[in-house]
Image (spheres, rainbow, N blue to C red):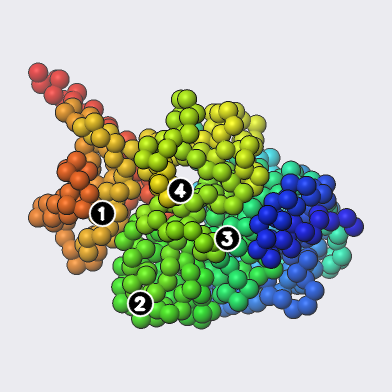
Amino acid sequence: MTLVKRDIFEAAKNFDFDATVRAAISGDFTAMNACYECCDRHADGDAIALIQENADGSSSRHTYAELRDQSAQLAHYLTQQGIQAGDIVAGLLPRGHALIVTILATWRIGAVYQPLFTAFGPKAIEHRIQTSGAKLVVSDVANRSKLLEVEQCPAVMTVADAQGQGLEAGDADFWQSIATLSTDFAPVMRSGNDPFLMMFTSGTTGLAKPLEVPLRAIVAFQRYMIDAVGLRAEDSFWNVADPGWAYGLYFGITGPMSMGLPVLSVDGLFNLERCLEIAKKYNVTNLAGAPTVFRMLIAAGEKVADQWKGQLRVVSSAGEPLNPEVIRWFKEHLDAPINDHYGQTEMGMVLCNHHNLAHPMHMGAAGYASPGHRVVVVNEETLEELPAGQPGILSVDVENSPMFWFNGYKDMETTSFKGRYYLTGDTAELNTDGSISFVGRSDDVISTSGYRVGPFDVESALLEHPAVIEAAVVGKPDKQRNEIIKAFVILQEGYEGTLELAEELRLHVRNRLAAHAYPREIEFPEELPKTPSGKVQRFILRINEINKYNEQQEAKQAVS
């Protein structure tokens, strides 16, 4: 069996970036398999691949050798159903043993794994399944009923409950179906440009867009784990992101397993008590997740500090900009550096404050270009690369980025590629030290009295006030100023959203930032609109304000 040249992954494990890039560019990409890279090559001996914490409080450990054998058994079942290399297998599964086996088996036969987030409703699932053309959906009892409402749903394989119940008519029983099948199934070799993941990403308009992730992206995923996350063999690593989304699938499963390290998988309710319990049980030293999680920890204050101080070695944040106040809190109360990382489903992580690379740390900046990527700020119209201090569109110079793997959406046109650049759609600003600061989504930037104000700065200032746990800032239409800054603030327990507190927050931000960059209006809702992965949806707040403004203008015109 011919395999991809081992120098690609050996160079990565040895922290030799130049050798990794050379191997990635010149390697034999006609022979590559994700199951081999993320399982089989680590399966000699008793190395642990999966540490599973279940919702019912039970736990288990699974070796790479066990996963190799079980994924081979499921691979036989898949091929018996006529599924072959290049076909799509979708997983509507919670974090767990069956999920990992499903992913690896799909990869083993050269097929493409498609994640379906378990919080999706039937229509979201239907769009993704119909668009991808999935040949099989693997589900569990808790999520199986959603598929009953999916039109043209393909065949279903279900993980039955402990009593063997929960299957619908025609379903295959996951564990029973593979129990007697052979554990011998050689990985099907593919090209490095062939896909191994089918992802969907939401834009500002339209339904979620499909994109294929090629096998060669595994090299970039592993580099991110080494360079940015700073993952070491001795670490107890926990990525709290759900594998139904890119950050959890790319860097909670694929990245660590490509290095032969254990994946800590935690199913069930996620709250402060459970988080602290898991962290203590497994002595977590390397933590990754979204700022929403870290704000939850900060809100708990001393309870978190007492347990975790001195235990965490490094912390990585991704998904939305990391507020400076969070950075200061982690340093002061946990004695742990928390670094901001920027990326997209389309390209992985390309702009980071790396834990394992030596460079200055610019407070509040998204970071520096990840090795193998040239990241710049350009004028969207002229494509001129902008100097420090001038906001523009954050872009990747594709011609000079050997680790960049995104080629566009599947069967869809995109305007994201212009000239030699991939335009992310985010507004950013180059700093004099070479770092890049995230300003906001292009349509999130607020234009007020001739000033352009990034919502991130205002939100960061608000979060520094002891009363605030979360904040979202948008531009509200205004005849005089074009827009005014409006803040939606979630308060810490013990505070009330009074007029006096609103004024105090306004003065706090005004003093913290500038006379023009403070919220003239503050609202105290019970919650903020968020995506299933926890990102605040500013656009919903902004649209609501636009609609209310238009209604007010229409009412005034009717009176006059």
Q: Which residue is mark 2?
A: 305
Looking at the picture, how far across and down is residue 101, in whole percent? 71, 63
In this view of the protein, which residue sits in the foreground, 534 or 284?
284
- The CA span between labels 2 and 3 is 27 Å
Residue furthest to the right in view is: 1
| Number of marks present in the image shown | 4
Evaluate if marks 4 and 1 touch, with contact meaning CB atoms under 8 Å apart: no
Q: Which residue is mark 1?
A: 461
Residue furthest to the top in view is: 560
From where the camera sits, is residue 540 visible?
no
Res. 384 mark: none
Q: Nearer the viewer, mark 2 or mark 1?
A: 1
Three-letter amino acid code at disc 3? Asp
- The CA span between labels 2 and 1 is 23 Å
Three-letter amino acid code at disc 2? Ala
Q: Secondary structure at mark 1?
A: helix
Three-letter amino acid code at disc 4? Gly
Residue furthest to the front in view is: 432
Three-letter amino acid code at disc 1? Ala
Evaluate if marks 4 and 3 touch, with contact meaning CB atoms under 8 Å apart: no
Q: Nearer the viewer, mark 2 or mark 3?
A: 3
Q: Determine the residue positioned at 67% across, 60% down.
A: 16
- The CA span between labels 3 and 1 is 30 Å
